[in-house]
Image (cartoon, rainbow, N blue to C red):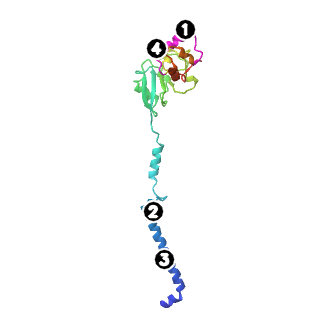
Amino acid sequence: MLEWVKNHKQFVVIAALMFILLSYYLVSSVLKPLEDEENGNWEPSSTEPESTVEEEGKQVEEIEEQEILVDVKGAVQNPGVYKATTGDRVIDVIERAGGITEAANGEVVNLAMRVTDEMVIYVPLIGEETESVAGVVSPGGGESDKININKATATELETLSGIGPAKSAAIIEYRETNGPFQTIEDIMSISGFGEKTFEKLKESISVK
C-alpha cells in the first residue's frame, strides 16, 4: 500500500485537495444561511410559500366603503338627508326614507343606480309634469340635469340644495314680477339669496 502511495503520490495529493475543497464548500453552504439569519440578513428563497404575499395583495385591492350624504326629496315618506355608503343603491336610500308614497311615480327613478356623495334623489308624483324628470340628479352633471329657474315648478325648485317652500315661492314670485332671469347670477337679486346660497346653487341651475 505504501509503495502504491509513493508511486501515485501526485494523484493522492490532488484527491486530498479536492476532498478538502468539497468539504469546505459543503460546510459553507450550511453555515452561511444560519449566519445570515442571526444577523438579520436572511431572505426567503423563491420556493417559499407565497400565501402571505397573496393575502396582502387582496387586502390592498379591497375598496373601502366611504360614508356619504344623499338628499332624498319628493314623494317619499320622510324626505331629508341620509347617510349612505359608496356601495349603496338608490333603492337602499329610499327605503331609509320610509319608501315612496302611494302617490309617487316610482317608474321614472332608477332604483338600481349606485349613489354618490351630494346626490339628490327626487321621486315625482304620478302625473307630475316636468320637462325632463330624471328621478336622480347627480352633482356636476350635464346641462340637462340642471333646474331651469325660469320654468321649474315649486316642487322641482325644492329639489335644489337649501331650497324649501319659502325660497321656491320667492323664485317664482320674482320671475312673475320681473320677467325671466337673464343669468343665473340674477337669483341673488332675491332677498335671502346671497353669495353663499348662490355658490351652492350655481352648478345645479340654468336659465335656458
- Secondary structure beneath label 3: helix
Provide the secondary structure element on which disc 1 rests. helix
Q: Which residue is mark 2?
A: 36
Specify whether 95 is left or right of 14.
left
- Mark found first going from the N terminus, 2 or 4: 2
Real-space Cα distance between discs 1 and 3? 109 Å
In front of the other: 116 or 180: 180
Residue at image x 45%, y 48%?
A: 56
| Sequence-first tag of 1 and 3 | 3
Give coordinates of residue 83: x percent, y percent: 42, 29
Residue bounds of the magenta highlight: 161-184
Query: What kind of residue is marked 3?
Result: Ile
Circle 4 — which element? helix
Mark 1: few/some/many CA within 10 Å (<14, 14-19, 20+): few
Q: Quadrant of residue 208?
A: top right
> Of helix, strand and loop, which mostly describes the magenta segment?
helix
Give the foreground label among 2 and 3.
Answer: 2
| Contact flag, marks 1 and 2 (Cβ < 8 Å) | no
Label 2 and label 4: CA atoms lie apart by 77 Å
| Residue 23 seen | yes
Q: What amino acid is at disc 2?
A: Asp
Could you tell me how far apart the alpha carbons at marks 4 and 1 are, in whole angstroms? 16 Å
Q: Give the residue number, with chain letter if any, for mark 1.
A: 177
Amino acid marked by disc 4: Ala
Asked if residue 165 lies in the magenta stretch, the reply is yes
Q: Earlier in the sequence, mark 3 or mark 4?
A: 3
Tell me the residue at 46%/15% (across/down).
Answer: 165
